[in-house]
Amino acid sequence: MVTAAALVLGAAGPAVAREARLPPPLDLFSKKPPKLRGTIHSRAIPLPQPRPAEAPKAETDKAESDQAEPEAAEKSAGPGKKAEPPPPSACRLALTEEIAIAPSVPDIKGPGGCGGEDLVRLEAVVLADKRKVAVKPAAILRCKMATAIADWIRSDIVPIAAGLGSQLSDLDNFDSYECRGRNRIAGALLSEHGRANALDVRAFRLANGKSIYLTDRTVARELRESVLHSACARFSTVLGPGSDWYHEDHIHLDAAERRSNYRICQWNVWDPLPQVAPLLPAGRPEEAPPREVAAKSEVPAKPQAEKSEQDEPEAEEKPAPAKPKPTKKRR
């Protein structure tokens, strides 16, 4: 028993000695300055490796990568052979000459995300009876937007024009593709015009030479409302008068994709302005007599005999003035 207890104490002796050698805990509330428990060893922080000399600059990475793609395609095709263009899209195959005159144009890759792919130049819309509605000037649009414009003209606008007793002739294109910010404000978000996904329409022209301006208050309200309802049903964004000060003389249409298929339809169909009365009276006609003569001629003169007969009874009818009563003196 004594031997076992000695062994236990001998084994526990070093642990007890280590605990005894530990420094006391730091007293935060003592007035004495704290003592450091050991020296601080500085360790060098590794720095990033330098940029390789053959690496391109950060600003030109995207531009050079865009240029490298066609070069790589040419190299893969072999010397003396050009890279084959990509196959036409489903939209391009569906937009035939029976629907619209819209030849394909090369893809546009402009600064700041401008441009797009699968572009066409919409020159005219072909109707069911083979007549053409010209787009003046021709609009550079994405294939899906051009298809939406063609369907809108064929299905909605042509019947509206037929109700006016004429046929649709032209579409007045106010703006299509343009690399710019929204409302041409510097620093604004990229407009759908910069993506070739928008068209500004100002008017429709009929075969009889008459033009229908969509923002003109003198145009029948029912006509403008019918165009409004048809446009808002087909396009994701419709902006006109009342939306802001930038769309008071034309209608903006685009096919922007948003979450949950969110749509914007802001176009107030204003009533005609009331007729304001002129500030000055109308001029006196030349054949009118002078004002003095006209004033005398309007009041007829009475005969002298009638005037004396009417005056005599008035004199007879007047009662004689009453005599004043004597007043009593007061004492």
Image: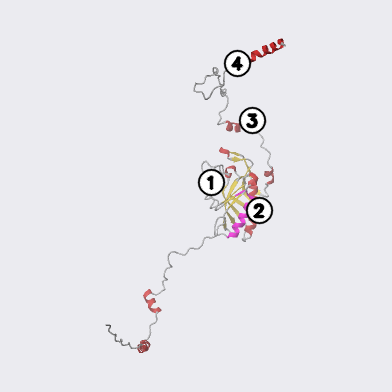
Q: Amino acid at mark 4?
A: Ala
Crowdedness near tag 3: few (<14), some (14–19) or many (≥20) residues, C-alpha within 10 Å: few
Q: Which labelled disc corresponds to residue 183?
A: 1
Which callout, 3 or 1, points to the residue nearer the camera? 1
Q: Is residue 324 above or below residue 106?
A: below
Crowdedness near tag 4: few (<14), some (14–19) or many (≥20) residues, C-alpha within 10 Å: few
Nearer the observer, 5 or 214? 5
Q: Which labelled disc corresponds to residue 153?
A: none
Residue 89, how many percent across, how many down? Answer: 68, 41
**Quadrant where the C terminus lies?**
bottom left
Residue 205 falls inside the magenta stretch: no
Q: Which labelled disc corresponds to residue 20?
A: 4
Q: Earlier in the sequence, mark 2 or mark 3?
A: 3
Crowdedness near tag 2: few (<14), some (14–19) or many (≥20) residues, C-alpha within 10 Å: some
Residue at numbered disc 2:
154
Q: Residue at x 69, y 46 (%)?
A: 94
Tell me the distance, in whole angstroms, between the alpha carbons under discs 2 and 3.
43 Å
Q: Earlier in the sequence, mark 1 or mark 4?
A: 4
User: SS of the residue at dot 3?
Assistant: helix
Q: Which residues are magenta?
A: 220-237
Q: Main SS type for the magenta part? A: helix
